[in-house]
Amino acid sequence: MLENTKLKLVVEKEFCKGCGICVAFCPKDVLILEKGKVKVENLDACIQCGQCELRCPDYAIYLGGN
Amino acid sequence: MPSKLVDKYFRTDSLPHIWCPGCGNGIVTRAIVKAIDNLNLNQEDVCIVSGIGCSSRASGYLDFNTIHTTHGRALAFATGIKFANPNLHVIVITGDGDCAAIGGNHLIHAARRNIDLTTIVFNNNIYGMTGGQYSPTTPTGDKGTTAPYGNIDANFDLCELAKASGATYVSRSTVYGANMIIKQVEEGIKNKGFSFIETITICPTYYGRKNKKGDAVDMMNYLKENTVNKIAYEKLSEEKRKDKIIVGEIYKGQRPEYVEEYEKIIESF
Amino acid sequence: MAEKIVKLMQGNEACVEGAIAAGMRFYAGYPITPSTEIAELSAEKLPRIGGKFIQMEDEIASISAIIGASLTGKKSMTATSGPGFSLKQEGIGYAVAAEVPCVIVNVQRGGPSTGLPTSPAQGDIMQARWGTHGDHSIIALYPSTVREIYDTTIKAFNLSEKYRTPVILLMDEVIGHMREKIEIPDPDEIKIINRKKPNVKPDEYLPYKIEENDMIPAMANFGEGYRYHVTGLIHDETGFPTSNHRIAENLVNRLVNKIKDNADDIVEYEEYLMEDAEQIIVAYGATARSAKSAINQLREEGVKIGLFRPITIWPMAEKQLKIIAKKVNRITVVEMNMGQYFNEVDRVAGKYTKVDKYSRVHGELITPEEIVSFIKEG
């Protein structure tokens, strides 16, 4: 999983509709909703499982970049 | 900047999409694209055909050969496309109203022919685009704007319908278990014949609100708690089976595929 | 020069032969009297030349399938009659809006509803024009002999490709089922028109962009590397839906005008004994044959009468009819309906001359004798 350690969570705020699905199903409570948009609150806890990206209906959060 | 996957396969200038907050359609659409990516298909060789309804808006967001057809007819258009150009991977995106009500006849006949199409039904149990009328998959007793006293129609089991009609790959998944959608779409595309994938999606805006199912998270939790794999389901008691959503591969069979059978006739001359 | 092939052929068969000569390689249909032979013969002939035939579950599925097939570049056709033509309207509207070439044959039968399945009628004139909802233009052709069915079927394909529009071929039951000797033209003599392909790279392609002085956008086929979006919704030049009012109006105007403004290219008609005519008959299809015979009889009796026979029913030969109306003192429209084309002829010619109608809807051909006595009654 070395490669994965390089990935970070990216939020595309403009796409977010604030449904809260990613927040609810993040196994490590990394995310919160703030002013109706998703926010990465506790990045250190992220295990890069990709559940948020998988279930985000709006393509507003994903694992990517460096 | 959207993810690489979205950037490659979506027409990103048309995002964000029109679907309501918490609508599961975006989850299914991404899963379809992920399956296409996993299979390494060329975008030029993929044709996405959709009908009319919330689900069918998906075609416009996707960067392939795409066609948004008339209500219920996606499978008939797709049949023409596939039969005329068998080199295309033809994927049909449809909804429960589109494919089981107005398009029900096309569904059973496409399955009967076992024509090589991959059909993904976004089943949200309601007509969303027109504002919450009951559909052929609205559970009996549930409400819609046209069933204000509760729906007295029996609801379709779409997978059983597709199987009985002759589909050679039939499966069900939910937007909660979206990884399963990806696997099933891959299997569906690989199957040389008619593939039918029912994805249970959520409509918090109409179905959820009308039937007091809570918000998107509540509806996702419902799917999480009430989904059971086909094998596990068979082991459940009659009592525990009630209201369970059976997921997984429902049926896999082998039958001659329509276009190939016709090509044999052509080759015989 | 090779010897001409002469064949005794049924009208419905001539339609299939003409379609194949025009390049038809895809047919989807649903059986219905009196058009069924077109499906049967297509089923027999198409696979022999590498084409495809499919019997769909209904008429809507059939027209949907041919639109899909046409998008991949195959010249496509469906045929139907009566109630089936009502079902085609959904797809006709889609093909108009998305500008997909295809040919819809309607071998007419008596209506309304299931009507008179085996009897001739010309009751679908206005349905061909306005059957699908919304403002639009349409091309409809109306042959009068078996040989002409062959030629007009080719023309129907050519016009559909040239103008990116569905073309309706209206036929009469009696001619569809009648056998006549026809001379098959040499393939080299047949003019074939194919849709205009894009001359830009895929990433520069705008599927509904038009060039100056040309209202027809270039059409790429699915599977050729040009990825684009097709929809029946109002769309801009990218093909994507829009509710922009200005774009909506421009699109509907272009769809209408691309046919209307090219009427001179599309309109075809026959004039018979018109030079010295003091009055004329307007008739089409099988009725025009009775009219011709009536005119011959009347001429023998010294009546200076001629025939104007539209082969292109829509768009209407308005310019020609106006000129004629100014020269003659009576126009009689003879047709097997309650006056559907009469109303149109009257609209165009009524202010210049007297326009009469002779209409029958009894499920039998109008005879020359009936026409003769109607004309004599004045």
Image (cartoon, grey):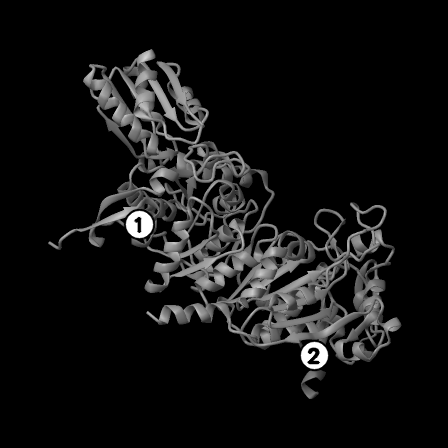
Query: For the view shown, which residue lies furthest in the left direction?
Result: C1
The local secondary structure at tag 2 comes to loop
Residue B266: which quarter of the image? bottom left
Using a 10 Å C-alpha cutoff, classify the residue at mark 2 as few (fewer than 14 neighbours), some (14 to 19) or many (20 or more): some
Q: Chain of mark 1?
A: C
What amino acid is found at the position of numbered circle 1 in the picture? Gly
Q: Residue at x 79, y 46 (%)?
A: B145
What amino acid is found at the position of numbered circle 2 in the picture? Leu
Left or right: residue B209 versus residue C339 is right
Left or right: residue A15 versus residue C282 is right
Q: Residue at x 30, y 26 (%)?
A: C291
Mark 1 and 2 residues: CB-CB less than 8 Å, in contact? no
Using a 10 Å C-alpha cutoff, classify the residue at mark 1 as few (fewer than 14 neighbours), some (14 to 19) or many (20 or more): many
Residue marked by disc 1 = C18
Q: Chain of mark 2?
A: A
Residue marked by disc 2 = A7
